């Protein structure tokens, strides 16, 4: 169990340091707004946040090397999406343009990720997403001359983070002056 939690913010980076009461080899699973961003054996991790942006950072500690950090993730709010893609094998690729579409509207660029010949795949954590909205993403490889390659489409998917409120019936009994709430049938 995490017994101490310290954050240090320096402009766009936030350093989180935790202390665990576990002994032996400890695995730390780091989450940003409920989305797994890393698993480490280090008790500290750096997060990139925009100036003024606030996020919920959580860490789960365990001695179990086989712990599934995705299946056991904390509830996330507000929603974010981990966008993942495999690199292009085209040797002329300079960077990847990541675009997002909400509710079948216009595409907007959310990030440009430099190409790295040493990486096989990339991932990007989205900004906060609106509940009950439909999102799609596309990743466009761009060469040094600025020409777009064939894009990869991710989604669309509907973001549902806040379930519908339960339907209740309310009754008042004047005798003992009690109010009773019961789930509607």
Image (cartoon, rainbow, N blue to C red):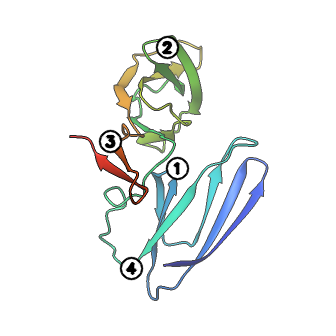
Can you give x and y, in whole percent of width and height, for residue 158 in the image? Answer: 36, 28
Query: Mark 3 and mark 4: span between their CA atoms?
Result: 47 Å
Give me the disc on residue 33. 1
Query: Mark 1 and mark 4: span between their CA atoms?
Result: 23 Å
Name of the residue lying farthest toward the right: 11
Q: Earlier in the sequence, mark 3 or mark 2?
A: 2
- Residue identifier under label 4: 63
Q: Earlier in the sequence, mark 1 or mark 4?
A: 1
Residue at image coords 48%, 57%: 38
Q: Secondary structure at mark 1?
A: loop
- Does the residue at mark 1 contact the one at mark 4 (Cβ under 8 Å)? no
- Residue identifier under label 2: 148
Query: Mark 1 and mark 3: span between their CA atoms?
Result: 34 Å
Query: Mark 4 and mark 2: span between their CA atoms?
Result: 46 Å
Q: Secondary structure at mark 4?
A: loop
- 97 versus 61 height, above or below: above
Can you give x and y, in whole percent of width and height, for residue 57 in the image? Answer: 57, 57
Q: Earlier in the sequence, mark 2 or mark 1?
A: 1
Query: Mark 3 and mark 2: span between their CA atoms?
Result: 57 Å
Q: Which tag is nearer the camera, tag 3 or tag 2?
A: 3
Q: Earlier in the sequence, mark 4 or mark 2?
A: 4
Q: Secondary structure at mark 3?
A: strand
- 27 versus 105 height, above or below: below
- Residue identifier under label 3: 169
Can you give x and y, in whole percent of width and height, for residue 30 in the image? Answer: 50, 60
């Amino acid at each position: 169990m995490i017994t101490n939690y310290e954050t240090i913010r320096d402009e766009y980076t936030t350093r989180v340091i935790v202390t665990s009461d576990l002994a032996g080899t400890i695995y730390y699973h780091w989450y940003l707004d409920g989305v797994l961003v890393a698993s480490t054996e280090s008790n500290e991790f750096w997060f990139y946040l925009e100036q003024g942006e606030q996020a919920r950072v959580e860490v789960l500690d365990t001695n179990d090397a086989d712990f599934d950090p995705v299946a056991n993730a904390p509830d996330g709010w507000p929603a974010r999406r981990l966008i993942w893609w495999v690199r292009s094998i085209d040797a002329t690729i300079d960077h990847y343009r990541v675009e997002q579409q909400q509710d079948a509207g216009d595409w907007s660029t959310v990030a440009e990720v430099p190409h790295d010949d040493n990486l096989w795949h990339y991932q990007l954590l989205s900004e906060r997403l609106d509940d009950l909205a439909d999102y799609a993403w596309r990743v466009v490889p761009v060469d040094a001359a600025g020409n777009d390659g064939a894009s990869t489409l991710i989604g669309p998917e509907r973001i549902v983070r806040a379930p519908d409120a339960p339907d209740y019936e309310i009754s008042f009994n004047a005798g003992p002056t009690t109010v009773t709430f019961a789930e509607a049938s």
